[in-house]
Amino acid sequence: QVQLVESGGGLVQPGESLRLSCAASGFTFRLYTMSWYRQAPGKERELVAAITSTGSITNYADPVKGRFTISRDNAENTVYLQMNSLKTEDTAVYYCNAVRPVPYVNYWGKGTLVTVSS
């Protein structure tokens, strides 16, 4: 059974940091590109950051560049999102995503809520 379980969300003040984790099971984690998406209230889900299967290439959305870092541990089947200098506009539910292009497979976690508020 495929599972992506996010953790680490919570309530923080602007300028603070959080580290999200996504524990994967039920599939061959090391073969998948992993991503973090987020969805703010009233907005569409958007890509935050992605990392290739080996971790050699990362990609970030412009609003988080320089503040967020995505990483993965293929031995632990876990992907992380280190979020620094958080802003109120980072408030959203953050989702973990796993994708393999051939054959195409796409998995989603249930999300973890991040609230940035003073």
Image (cartoon, helix red, strand yellow):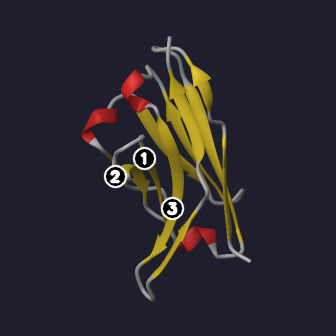
Above or below, comparing residue 108 to residue 36 in the picture:
below
Depth order, front residue of 83/54: 83
**Residue at image coords 54%, 55%:** 96
Relative placement, left or right, of 50 versus 30 is left
Q: Which mark is residue 96?
A: none
User: What residue did someone put label 2 on?
Assistant: 44
At label 2, counting other C-alpha atoms closer than 10 Å, the crowd grade (few under 14, some 14-19, many 20 or more) is: few
Determine contact: label 3, label 2, CB under 8 Å.
no
User: What residue did someone put label 1 on?
Assistant: 39
At label 1, counting other C-alpha atoms closer than 10 Å, the crowd grade (few under 14, some 14-19, many 20 or more) is: some
Above or below, comparing residue 93 to residue 5 in the picture:
above
- Occupied quadrant, residue 75: bottom right
Depth order, front residue of 77/45: 45
Inter-mark Cα distance, 2 to 1:
6 Å
- Provide residue 53's location: percent of width, then percent of height: 49, 65
Inter-mark Cα distance, 1 to 3:
13 Å
- Provide residue 38's location: percent of width, then percent of height: 44, 47
Marked residue nearer the N-terminal end (3 or 2): 2
Inter-mark Cα distance, 3 to 2:
15 Å
- Occupied quadrant, residue 29: bottom right
